[in-house]
Image: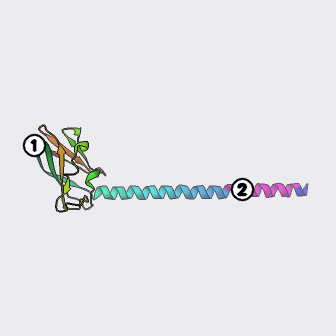
């Protein structure tokens, strides 16, 4: 009976060690994933807090609606990540990207703080309201008179 008790004790102890090691690994993975998610959330919140836009001039030039928007925040913005609504309808698919430029940087599509982006949209009807939303949710609304 002495040998069988010793063998059973070794088996149970070995099983407890394996389960404990697996638990420690799982706990470490969960805390790492949680920490990464919190860091990502904080980065997105900081980017959103440092992003602001102001719609300036809006005018209809024949069949092209032109909108000048100033980056009033402290973070650069990528214009192709913006969405545009004209009178409540999504107009992003109608943006003419070959005519949309960052003024002062004709070859660049990085819209820095204090710079103006000129959007061109294919549009033929009169416009009452324009909304521009950046990729991280900053937005501005302009009524057209």
Q: Locate residue 3, reporting x and y percent.
A: 89, 57
Rendering quarter of residue 110? bottom left
Q: Which residue corresponds to mark 1?
A: 62
Q: Locate residue 79, reporting x and y percent.
A: 25, 53
Left or right of residue 64, residue 97 in this image: right
In magenta stretch: residue 13: yes
Name the N-terminal-most of marks 1 and 2. 2
Helix, strand or loop at mark 2: helix
Q: Is residue 73 above or below residue 131?
A: below
Q: Residue at x 27, y 56 (%)?
A: 78
Front one among 73 and 62: 62
Left or right of residue 12, residue 27 in this image: left
Colour mapping: rainbow
Mark 1–mark 2 distance (CA, rounded to whole Å) = 78 Å
The magenta stretch is 4-19
Helix, strand or loop at mark 1: loop
Please rate how many residues cluster around mark 2, counting C-alpha atoms within 10 Å: few if below 14, some from 14 to 19, many from 20.
Answer: few
Q: Nearer the viewer, mark 1 or mark 2?
A: 1
């Amino acid at each position: 009976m002495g040998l069988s008790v010793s063998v059973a004790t070794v088996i149970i102890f070995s099983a407890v060690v394996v389960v404990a090691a697996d638990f420690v690994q799982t706990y470490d993975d969960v805390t790492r994933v949680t920490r990464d998610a919190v860091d990502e959330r904080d980065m997105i919140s900081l980017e959103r807090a440092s992003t602001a836009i102001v719609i300036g001039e809006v005018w209809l030039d024949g069949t092209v609606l032109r909108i000048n928007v100033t980056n009033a925040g402290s973070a650069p913005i990528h214009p192709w990540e913006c969405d545009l609504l004209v009178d409540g309808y999504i107009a992003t698919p109608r943006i003419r990207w070959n005519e949309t430029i960052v003024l002062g940087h004709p070859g660049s599509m990085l819209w820095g703080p204090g710079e103006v982006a000129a959007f061109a949209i294919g549009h033929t009807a009169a416009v009452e309201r324009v909304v521009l939303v950046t990729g991280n949710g900053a937005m501005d609304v302009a009524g057209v008179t």
